[in-house]
Amino acid sequence: MALQLGDVAPDFTAMTTEGEIKFHDWIGDSWCVFFSHPKDYTPVCTTELGAVAKLKPEFQKRNCKVIGLSVDPVDSHKGWAKDIEETQGTALNFPVVADADRKIADAYGMIHPKALDTLTVRTVFVIGPDKKVKLMITYPASTGRNFDEILRVIDSLQLTSKHSVATPVNWKHGDDVIIVPSLSNDDAKKKFPGGWKEVKPYLRIVPQPK
Ligand code: BEZ
């Protein structure tokens, strides 16, 4: 069955541009963004990996490790890394998994043959420190991703994992949030003593908890 939110992310041992890793051990107590790209030495992928390398400090602020994957071998990744540094102005600073036999891609459902024969499409998995899948997004090969959106979702996931809140449309860090419908008003009074704005009984707005 296809991987679903809440499933434990399949563990694996694999060669990467930074040596062999055992995935769950490598994640440790961090959050993780695991993303696939279709192929080395392709234009959109080159811009994406450069952008992710530039955003590394933002991922680190969120205690989040980043790791890429494609079905190319590690020597190809390493050769391509030179082009990424040359053209994007940032060296590759996170590991990229070499999955030439496609075992990991298959375990994660990263190959969508009706879209792209044998290559991985652009999947993104956010995995929590508990190793469970918290977010899955899939883009076609022709559309480069917006990694600022991935950071925004990580902010939401980290906030909502600690507090009884959900984040509304287009929310970003610092904006007001919504009290989850499962929390009664009596319990909400204990958690949000400053009160809330009740737009509807099911739509209760509070400032973002610290
Ligand atoms: C690219 O990264 O530019 C790309 C890769 C595979 C198919 C189409 C575009």
Image: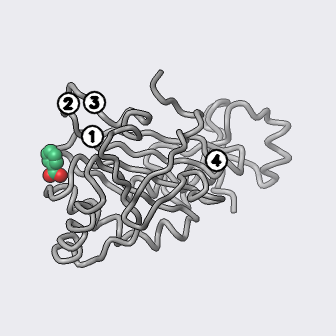
Mark identifier at residue 160: 4
Q: Residue at x 21, y 68 (%)?
A: 79
Question: Which one is in front, 121 or 139?
Answer: 121
Of helix, strand and loop, which one carries label 1? loop
- Quick one: label 3 or label 1, which is nearer the N terminus? 3
The reply to whether dot 3 and dot 1 touch (C-beta < 8 Å) is yes
How many angstroms separate mark 4 from mark 1 (CA)? 29 Å
Measure how far apart labels 2 and 4 are at the Cα level.
34 Å
Q: Which residue is mark 2?
A: 115
Within-10-Å neighbours for mark 2: few <14, some 14–19, many 20+: few
Question: Considering depth in this image, is 188 or 98 the residue closer to the camera?
Answer: 98
The residue wearing badge 3 is 112
Q: Position of residue 157 (x, y in %)?
A: 57, 49
Circle on res. 121: 1
Three-letter amino acid code at disc 2? Ala
Q: Quadrant of residue 18?
A: bottom left
Q: Which mark sits nearer the N-terminus, 3 or 4? A: 3
Residue 69 percent location from the top left of the image: 35, 51
Q: CA distance from mark 3 to mark 1?
A: 7 Å
Q: Is residue 90 left or right of residue 127?
A: left
Q: Quadrant of the C terminus?
A: bottom right
Q: Answer yes or no: do the residues labelled 2 and 1 have beta carbons within 8 Å?
A: yes
